[in-house]
Image (tube, grey):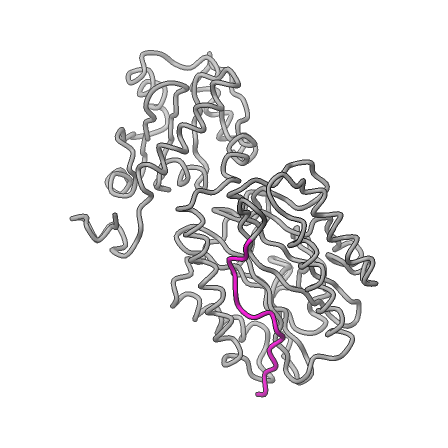
Amino acid sequence: MTAASLDAAPLVEPGARLTPPDEVERRLAGLQATLGGRGLDAVLVLQNADLYYYSGTVQQSFLYVPADGRATLFVRKVVERARLESPLEHIVALRGVRELPGAVAERYGRLPARMGLELDVLPVAQARRLEGLFPGTVFVDVGPDIVRQRAVKSPWEIARIAAAAALADEVFRLAPGLLEEGMTEAQFAGRIEAEARRLGHEGIIRMRGFNQEMFYGQLLSGASGTAATFLDTPLGGTGLSPAVAQGVSFRPIRRGDHVVFDFVAVREGYIADFTRILALGPLPDDLARAYDAALRVQEAVRRVAGPGVTCSSVWSTAANAAESLGYGDGFMGSGEGKVRFVGHGVGLELDELPVLASSELELAEGMVFALEPKFVLPGRGAIGVENTWHVTADGIAALTTASEDVVEVAR
């Protein structure tokens, strides 16, 4: 089903794919099973990524999911769009949040004694307001439960991530023709972003972590790749000011420089993460050796990763491989910029489970993650590779498929 079949096309992009009803029903059933297991009467979903996951819309809403029975989407703005976008049967207009308790009681006959909230991401002021509106209700954090459920993707979701991966592959195919000696990182990024947007990149990169934010990715040339920053990533970049403090700079890209093309693609809400290397001229031998080491680390992980393998096993495999190749010091960053993971889940957010770190969480079929073995070499720059992988029944398969060869740009 597509939005083109609906009468009110001006409210919904005609080419947009709507979330199928069976997807939403399956997700809600999974959430309800969690509620039953935790002794909760209901959950109230507000955060955009979770709201879209369970309802198919991000219109300003409160999704009330009882432990038993049908969910209701109470919409403040815009109810007409929510009814077009969401497959949910029960969608109710709500003039303001003060009406919510009465609307819940009217629809379900009572208010919940114990209700889940996404307290991992919900602002304190919002949570306290809800506590005031539901004075007899005990609120419990269900954010981690939602994150764990969302970690395993359905075939429909994997197809969306594959579309984002195809966008990343295509943008990189165009990249050599957009890079010219003497342009700044910001100018190059602008050309890349324009092409990505033309191809359907949605622009918004959602992250769950507090104060974690990113714009399209980081295209870092030469020594720019060694600039560490606050973001939970091995590569930072200076950014254009301390107000952002990450990403591209006004540094000119010179002959002899290489560019770490670290790009996040988004299609239909779903994310793929991707890194390749461009070079203005031959890649120097020391960087070529480091890049080969990154490919070897990736291959070591590919051989061991699969259902039932713990994240800590993946992390130790990667770290040990980097150490044995002589790159332990610069693996996944340098100095204060070093991070202790080699990959992260992707989906509706860039920082999902599984995190390939010292965790006993086991990989499961249907999980999708970005594997990003990278090295930061002080005074020389950063180097590495990144692909988005799907956990299959017998291993992992890459969704990003562009050649991993370093691309030498003549201009």
Q: In which image quadrant can residue 404 be found?
A: bottom right
Look at the image and tell me whether residue 92 can be seen: no
Above or below: residue 195 compared with residue 270: below
Give the residues drawn in magenta, as a range.
397-411
Q: In which image quadrant can residue 78 be found?
A: top left
Left or right, residue 71 beside residue 347: left
User: Which residue is located at x 64 percent, y 36 percent?
Assistant: 361
Above or below: residue 322 compared with residue 355: below
Image spot of residue 19 (x, y percent):
33, 43
98 or 193: nearer the viewer: 193
120 or 101: nearer the viewer: 120
The quarter of the rendered structure image containing the C terminus is: bottom right
Above or below: residue 386 compared with residue 209: below
Above or below: residue 110 compared with residue 336: above
187 or 208: nearer the viewer: 208
User: Which residue is located at x 78 percent, y 75 percent?
Assistant: 286
Image spot of residue 292 (x, y percent):
72, 69
Q: Residue furthest bottom?
A: 411
Magenta segment includes 118: no
Left or right, residue 186 beside residue 331: left
Magenta segment includes 398: yes
User: Which residue is located at x 38 percent, y 62 percent?
Assistant: 200
